[in-house]
Image (cartoon, helix red, strand yellow):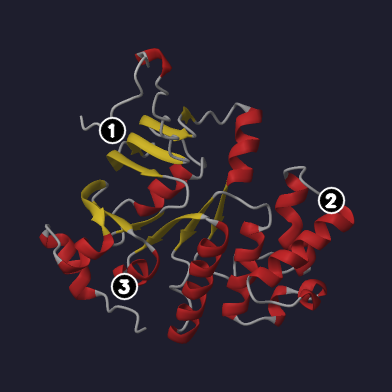
C-alpha cells in the first residue's frame, strides 16, 4: 500500500467504510429449466441477468428456446427448475404486492404491431391501460401521461382519438412502445420488435429504442434471430440453441470472433442492418 493510499493515522478497520454492495440485477434466470406438460424440454439450465441500464440480446434460430425464456422473464410461465429473480428475490406469481411492483418495472413489446393493439380501442385507452391497471393514474392524469409517452416515441398527441387501423406498421409499433414505457418501467423486454417491419422502418424503430435508452436509462432485452439488429442495440448477447446457452459475451466479440460454430452460422445466415 502506498503512502497516498494508506488510511489516516489512528483509523481503525471499523472506521473505514465498507464498499457499497452491488445492486442485484433487475431480472435474472438462475439455472432455469422448462418442460412442456408432455415432457419435452424447452429450456435447460439457462442463466442470464439484466442489470439496470444494460442491454442484452437473446438470439437463436426458431426452436432455440427464446420464446420460452421470454415467457419466464415476463412471469407468464413458472420454471420447472431453477428460478426467476426480480431484484434478487424469487418471483412469486401469488405475491400480489411483488407482482404489482414487477409489472410496473418490467414491460414488453411484441413482434406483430397489427395484433398487439386492440382494434376496438382508441389509442388513448390503449396507451394509458398500464397506468389504469396498475393503479398509477386515471382520468385526465392518465391521458396526459399517455400523450407524453406518445411524444417520446415521435407521435403527436392528436393521435389519441384515433384507432389502430388508421396507422402504418411502424406507427403501430411506436404506439406499442409508448404503451410499454408509459408507466416508466426499468426494463423493456422486446420480442422481435422489428422483424415484421420493412428495412427503413426497422432502422427508425431501432433508433427510437436507442434514444429511449439514452434518455431514460431503460434496461433492454431484445429477443431476436437477427444478430444484425441485436448488434445495433445490445452490448451483451446470449446465444441459445436447443434450450441451452451455447455462447455469451460482449456483442462485438460475438460478432467478430465467435467461439462457436453455431454462432458463426447465425452471423453468416442473417444479413446485418445497414447503418
Q: Label 3 vs label 2: CA separation?
A: 40 Å
Using the rendered view, name the quadrant where residue 176 is placed: bottom right
Q: Is residue 136 above or below residue 81?
A: below
**On residue 138, which mark appears?**
2
Q: CA distance from mark 1 to mark 3?
A: 46 Å
* Residue 139, position as x, y percentages in the image: 88, 54
- Which of the 4 quarters of the picture holds residue 212? bottom right
Nearer the observer: mark 2 or 1; the answer is 1
For disc 3, the neighbor class at 10 Å (few under 14, some 14 to 19, many from 20) is some
- Secondary structure beneath dot 3 equals helix
Mark 2 to mark 1 CA distance (whole Å)? 55 Å
| Residue topped by disc 3 | 228
Label 2 Cα crowd, 10 Å radius (few <14 / some 14-19 / many 20+)? some
User: Position of 115 compared to 221: left or right?
Assistant: right
SS type, badge 1: loop
Callout 2: SS: loop
Q: Quadrant of the C terminus?
A: bottom left
Residue 68 vs 13, above or below: the answer is: below
Q: Measuring 74% from the left and 46% from the top, which residue is drawn there?
A: 133
Q: Are marks 2 and 1 in contact (CB under 8 Å)?
A: no
Mark 1 or mark 3, which has the lower sequence index? 1
Percent position of residue 113, x then y: 57, 70
Q: Nearer the viewer, mark 1 or mark 3?
A: 1
Q: Which label was assigned to residue 120?
A: none
Q: Is residue 203 left or right of residue 148?
A: left
The structure residue drawn at horizontal position 69% and vertical position 77%, both measured from the top left corner, is 155
Position in image of residue 31 (x %, y %): 30, 34
Amino acid at each position: 500500500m502506498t503512502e497516498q493510499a494508506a488510511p489516516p493515522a489512528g483509523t481503525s478497520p471499523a472506521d473505514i467504510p465498507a464498499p457499497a454492495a452491488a445492486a442485484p440485477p433487475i431480472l435474472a434466470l438462475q439455472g432455469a429449466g422448462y418442460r412442456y406438460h408432455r415432457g419435452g424440454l424447452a429450456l435447460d439450465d439457462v442463466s442470464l441477468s439484466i442489470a439496470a441500464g444494460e442491454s442484452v440480446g437473446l438470439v437463436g434460430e426458431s426452436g432455440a428456446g427464446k420464446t420460452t425464456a421470454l415467457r419466464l422473464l415476463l412471469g407468464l410461465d413458472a420454471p420447472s427448475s431453477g428460478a426467476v429473480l426480480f431484484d434478487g428475490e424469487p418471483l412469486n406469481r401469488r405475491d400480489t404486492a411483488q407482482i404489482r411492483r414487477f409489472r410496473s418495472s418490467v414491460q414488453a413489446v411484441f413482434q406483430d404491431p397489427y395484433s398487439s393493439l386492440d382494434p376496438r380501442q382508441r389509442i388513448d385507452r390503449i396507451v394509458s391501460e398500464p397506468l389504469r391497471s396498475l393503479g398509477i393514474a386515471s382520468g385526465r392524469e392518465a391521458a396526459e401521461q399517455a400523450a407524453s409517452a406518445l411524444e417520446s416515441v415521435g407521435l403527436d398527441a392528436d393521435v389519441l382519438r384515433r384507432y389502430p387501423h388508421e396507422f402504418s406498421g411502424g406507427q403501430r409499433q411506436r404506439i406499442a412502445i409508448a404503451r410499454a414505457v408509459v408507466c416508466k418501467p426499468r426494463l423493456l423486454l422486446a420480442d422481435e420488435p422489428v422483424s415484421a417491419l420493412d428495412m427503413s422502418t426497422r432502422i427508425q424503430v431501432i433508433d427510437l429504442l436507442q434514444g429511449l435508452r439514452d434518455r431514460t436509462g431503460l434496461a433492454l432485452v431484445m429477443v431476436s434471430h437477427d444478430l444484425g439488429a441485436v448488434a445495433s442495440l445490445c452490448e451483451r448477447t446470449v446465444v441459445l440453441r436447443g434450450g441451452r446457452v451455447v455462447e455469451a459475451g460482449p456483442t462485438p466479440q460475438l460478432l467478430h470472433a465467435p467461439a462457436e460454430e453455431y454462432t458463426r452460422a447465425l452471423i453468416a445466415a442473417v444479413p446485418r442492418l445497414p447503418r
